[in-house]
Amino acid sequence: MKREQLTITLREDILSRIDEKIDGITIRNRSHAIEVLLARFLNVRRVKKSLILAGGKGTRMRPFTYEIPKPMIPVQGKPLMQHIIELNRKHGINDILLSIGYLGDKIKEYFGNGSRFGVNIEYVEEKKFLGTAGCLNLVKDKINEPFLMFNGDVLAGIDLSDFISFHHENKGVATIALTPVDEPSRFGVARLQGSMILDFVEKPKKGAEPSKLINAGVYLMEPEVFEYVPKGFSMIEKDVFPKLASEGKLTGYSFTGQWFDTGTVEAYELAIKNWKGYENIK
């Protein structure tokens, strides 16, 4: 994106506050920090909608999920999905689509129309499980602008405003939030060229990983992504992202905030003990 160079004069106390935002990763320097802060203040490139995937059976979390849907499992006194909704609201994203299926009535009963949580919630129902991509066919008539998508079982300490700015600067059809892990050989690991994701290497041998970055389960996508989604059951990781990567339309955004995948009982226990919430996210 074209930029113009400006010379500005700021008070020392304001400049000091700006410097506090710089971490060398998500906020690279003073110029980037000022641009990000101005974009937020002016609501430039604002994303208005999020889709949260909450239709799975959560079989790896049994016996908990025999009675409650996985996104309703509590983490520090709140359903897991409530943390995701609060992150969206914190960044001014108040229109939430929930894709529900298994025990979906319990999700509806708790969240209702979203007014109790300061958001507007609309539901789409999967009559049968459609996978992480198939459910996109249920919402394509409801979305005509860039939108966020969340796996309903992750807690991600991500600065959504910077994520949005990154996506627009890099002009991909989809951007995947990537988080570093100590043992990437247990996951699908991103292979990148600059900000472009070339592919994911599934469970590479220890020491042969192309990076330490894995898919964090948070995505930002253009409506064009619907053209890549097959009919029926499909998985975004296997059926959509590889096509985008092969065309140079898939980018990766690395963040260093807390991240927990609550897909197993062991991971869930770690989240309960260690999740620090969104209070410290920019």
Image (cartoon, rainbow, N blue to C red):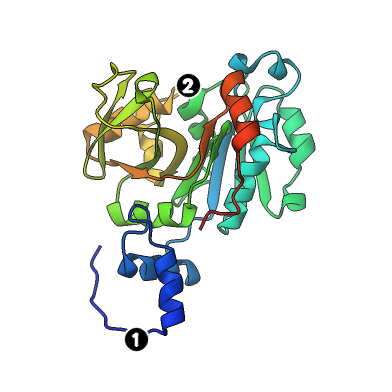
Amino acid found under the numbered disc labelled 2: Gly
Identify residue for label 2.
232
Residue 220 coordinates in the image, percent (x, y) = 43, 45
Q: Which of 40 and 149 is in front in this view?
A: 40
Q: Is any atom of residue 144 visible in this view?
A: yes
Residue wearing tag 1 = 9
Let me know if residue 99 appears in the view: no
Query: The N terminus appears in which quarter of the rendering?
Result: bottom left
- Contact (CB < 8 A) between labels 1 and 2? no
Q: Quick one: SS at disc 1?
A: loop
Seen at 35% across and 45% down, the residue is 253
Q: In this view, does 158 lie above or below 37?
A: above
Tell me the crowding category of disc 2: few under 14, some 14 to 19, or many 20 or more residues within 10 angstroms, Cα based.
few
Please, what secondary structure does the residue beneath circle 2 have? loop
Residue at x 33% of width, y 69% of height: 30
Give percent across and percent down for residue 117: 73, 51
Density class for disc 1 (Cα within 10 Å; few <14, some 14-19, many ≥20) is few
